[in-house]
Amino acid sequence: LGSRTLPPRPTGIAWTAGGEAEAKWTVRANHGGGYAYRVCPRGAELSEACFQQHPLAFAGKTFLEWGNGTRLAIPARILSNGTQPAGSQWAMNPLPFRPCYTSLPDNDPLNKGCSFAPPCAERHYNNSISMGFANFTGSCSGRFPVLVSIVDVLSIPADLAPGDYVLGFRYDAEMTAQVWQSCADISIVAPV
């Protein structure tokens, strides 16, 4: 029960109510699906009900970011119809869960059944020595995309009271019946 036993771990991150903030995540075993960001006040019971009371909206700016800081703006696929809680926003994982490689011919066995085109041109390579995988890994194809992060710009509600919060990231997988969650401590400050 991490929600009851994990002590606060201040990050020094402060977001301004009514402003925009960046959140960054990576996926190692890509299972497709969608995700949302929510906050729960520090000190409240960290439950799904608490997080659903404070969903964060996407500002419509999403990027891929590589280890050297290079970024590529990509279209965000955001849904607000039929979401839980009603009217909240969820985004589709921008990396295909069934990978395809634009540098390979369509008839190559690695290109079987792409879920959708990757958001950037992809070269495949075998990184079994450097990363410990026996499979091909890509930077945006979707197959073990350990070389790239997804950066989302979020809209911070203007009416969010200043204080300490837990940022919740909920990722519902598409290929499997799994929900992955992670969290971070942040502070919300009043606009200057």
Image (cartoon, helix red, strand yellow):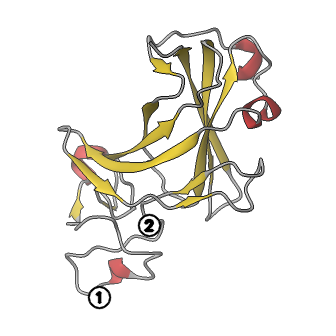
Q: Assign the C terminus to one quadrant of the image.
A: top left
Position of residue 76 in the picture relative to residue 82 (left or right): left
Q: Is residue 100 visible?
A: yes
Mark 1 burial class by Cα count in 10 Å: few <14, some 14-19, many 20+ = few
- Which comes before the other along the chain, label 2 or label 1? 2
Disc 2 crowd, CA 10 A, few/some/many (<14, 14-19, 20+): many
**Picture residue at 62% right of the left edge, 21% below the top:** 166
Q: Which mark is residue 74?
A: none
Across and down, in percent, residue 56 comes to 60, 38
Residue 147 visible somewhere in the drawing: no
How far across and how far down the image is residue 155, in percent? 51, 37
The Cα atoms of the two marked residues, 2 and 1, are separated by 16 Å
Nearest to viewer (mark 2 / mark 1): 2
Report the side of 142 relative to 33 (left or right): left
How far across and down, in percent of the image, does residue 188 sit? Answer: 55, 17
Q: Is residue 42 above or below residue 128?
A: above
**Residue at the image position 29 percent from the left and 88 percent from the top:** 106
Query: Which numbered disc covers residue 96?
Result: 2
Q: Amino acid at mark 1?
A: Asp
- Of residues 51 and 135, which is closer to you in this image? 51
Q: Residue 138: x percent and y percent?
A: 29, 59
Q: In what element is the residue under mark 1? A: loop
Q: Is residue 48 above or below residue 1?
A: below
Of the 4 image quadrants, the one containing the N terminus is: top right
- Determine which residue is flagged by label 1: 106
The amino acid type, in three-letter code, at marker 2 is Pro
Q: Given the current orientation, which residue lies at the most extreme front position?
A: 192
* Residue at screen point 68% across, 48% down: 88
